[in-house]
Amino acid sequence: MAVNANAKIVIIGCGISGIAAAHRLVNAGFRHVRILEATARSGGRIKTDRLGGNIVEIGANWIHGPSEENPVFCLARKYRLLDPEALTPENQAVDVGGHPPFVPTIFCSSGRKLNADDIYYTQEMFAELLKESSEFESQGGEPWACVGDFIRSEVQQRAAEKWKDIDATTRSLRLCMISNMLKLECCINGAHSMDEVGLGAYGLYKTLPGLDCTFPGGYEGLVKNLMSELSSGLVTYNQPVRCVRWNNTEKRENPLTIECDEERIAADHVIVTVPLGYLKKHHSALFHPPLPLHKLHSVQRLGFGTNNKIFVEFDSPWWDADCEVICLVWEDEDVMVDQVPDVQRSWIRKLCAFTLLKPTERYGHVLCGWIAGHESEYMETLSEQEVTHTVTQLIRRFTGNPTITPRRVLRSQWFHDPWTCGSYSHPAIGCSEQDLENMMEPLPTKGSQSQPLQVLFAGEATHPYYYSTVHGALLTGWREADRLISHYSSISPSEPPKSKL
Ligand SMILES: Cc1cc2nc3c(=O)[nH]c(=O)nc-3n(C[C@H](O)[C@H](O)[C@H](O)COP(=O)(O)OP(=O)(O)OC[C@H]3O[C@@H](n4cnc5c(N)ncnc54)[C@H](O)[C@@H]3O)c2cc1C
Ligand SMILES: *[C@@H]1O[C@H](CO)[C@@H](O)[C@H](O)[C@H]1NC(C)=O
């Protein structure tokens, strides 16, 4: 390892993927590994905050599929960050295919509450359609371009058949519920509308077994533990990278120049982990020469939308003790829409559900509201008071109780975070597996004469089937570190060193 250990490796971004890459490289013996992070903190989209005395997750909340194959689960277990229930074989064995079996409490815009029976058939049909959506292969054989069109047309057909004996009011209400479920799906996919999520590629996303669990002490505990194993000088904070100059054929040694505001860093390799939202906006300034066209097209084609949370704390609960999710159904939305016509006036219609932070002893009476899309981006521009006011009106209307008043409200603002520019990625219309392959392809591309593996790409949006998750992001960091490790271990020892100290 002696010679190779001298390679200079820069990692852009100190989110979970950057941290994972640094870990692997340092453990493999590389001595010149640095992380450059734009903000003053590590963790990126893992961000734990407080609302009053309670822990809230501004970014990632769950370990999706906590079981042996999930590296986030295994690390969290090693660092003893999980509740005992999450560690049980029973919990690990539950396989719900990504949609936990919540029984929602549904409130309607007229102020009435629906029964479980009212919901059952709609939920069943929607679940079937999601499953069918994921079974198309991205080979151009799918009947519609987007998931939204597929679901709408199928619901219309199936409702005409299966629900033909049902009265018009109930049938209309069921279609309104579909609108609500589409909006929730926008949150899950990080999309403005399910009309923007490609039907062919919807099934690329893979789930792991295990009933989703949270970190009782906050997701950032994972980041803190990992960071404590890296040497303290490894990360430079408040150091945004402005430009990566690559493909310099003159220089064999440290061919890359990484430009920051006050520093230029020479390096042999750079691992870029900036979010896809940032890449979409800043790719032309960030890469010199520019990204090859096929890669750029994939950056543009893949979707990166906004999903935000609005935490609302109450002095006392106005929901039943066994309630897990509260859904809000507008009774005038039987055209199955997941976008509001007038964002400024009716953005709040996109806030489709609240999940409960449980257990109450730990979190108090806190609801987490979910809102995706352009409506969510608009919400970010409003004052906290305005958001509080509008959410209060919403809850009063749907419960029919004009006295409910939140104690405190806190919301995330991921779209206006200059280093994220949204929440997470999804395959948009026209995307295929090839786009994710292009995302992860290192530069220069195969066949080029210049130094290989100058620019490598990690991060959530570069995982072929766990995109949009923490475990996906972590695995991509390891993947790119391994790419460098195997590159150096395949170089014969007789070759001259790539770089001197
Ligand atoms: C609201 C929300 C809820 C979520 N919920 C879940 C969940 O429950 N479970 C789950 O598994 N996943 C969830 N996710 C997704 C998960 O948080 C991400 O997939 C994961 O954290 C991404 O890690 P990353 O390393 O790819 O990117 P990031 O964490 O975004 O790290 C990238 C880093 O790069 C930095 N950066 C950007 N530009 C520059 C620059 N020019 N120079 C230097 N540094 C730069 C950023 O500041 C950031 O620190 C959620 C995300 C959001 C937003
Ligand atoms: C990289 O440099 C080589 C040699 O100068 C050149 O042929 C190639 O076009 C360059 N690639 C890019 C993407 O600029």
Image (cartoon, helix red, strand yellow):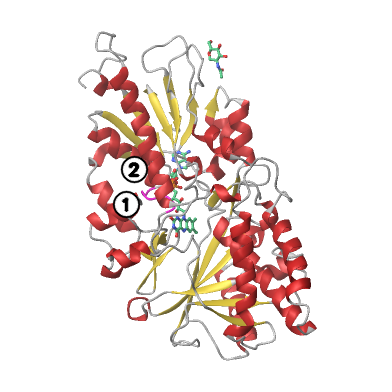
- Mark 1: few/some/many CA within 10 Å (<14, 14-19, 20+): many
| Residue 262 in view in this figure | no
SS under mark 1: helix
In the image, taking residue 438 as reference, residue 66 lies left or right, namely left
Q: Earlier in the sequence, mark 1 or mark 2?
A: 2
| Residue sitting at x 57%, y 31% | 285
Query: Which residue in the rendered view is the most extreme toward the left?
Result: 2
The three-letter amino acid code for the residue at tag 2 is Ile
In the image, taking residue 269 as reference, residue 349 lies left or right, namely right
| Residue 464 vertical placement versus 359 (above, below) | above
In the image, taking residue 367 as reference, residue 362 lies left or right, namely left
| Residue 411 vertical placement versus 313 (above, below) | above
Query: Does ligand 1 reach within 8 Å of label 2's beta carbon?
Result: yes
Q: Which residue is mark 2?
A: 19
| Residue 354 vs residue 138, the one in the foreground | 138
SS under mark 2: helix
| Residue sitting at x 55%, y 88% | 404
| Residue 220 vs residue 200, the one in the foreground | 200
Q: Which residues are magenta?
A: 40-45
| Residue 150 in view in this figure | yes
Q: Which residue is mark 1?
A: 223
In the image, taking residue 257 as reference, residue 421 lies left or right, namely right
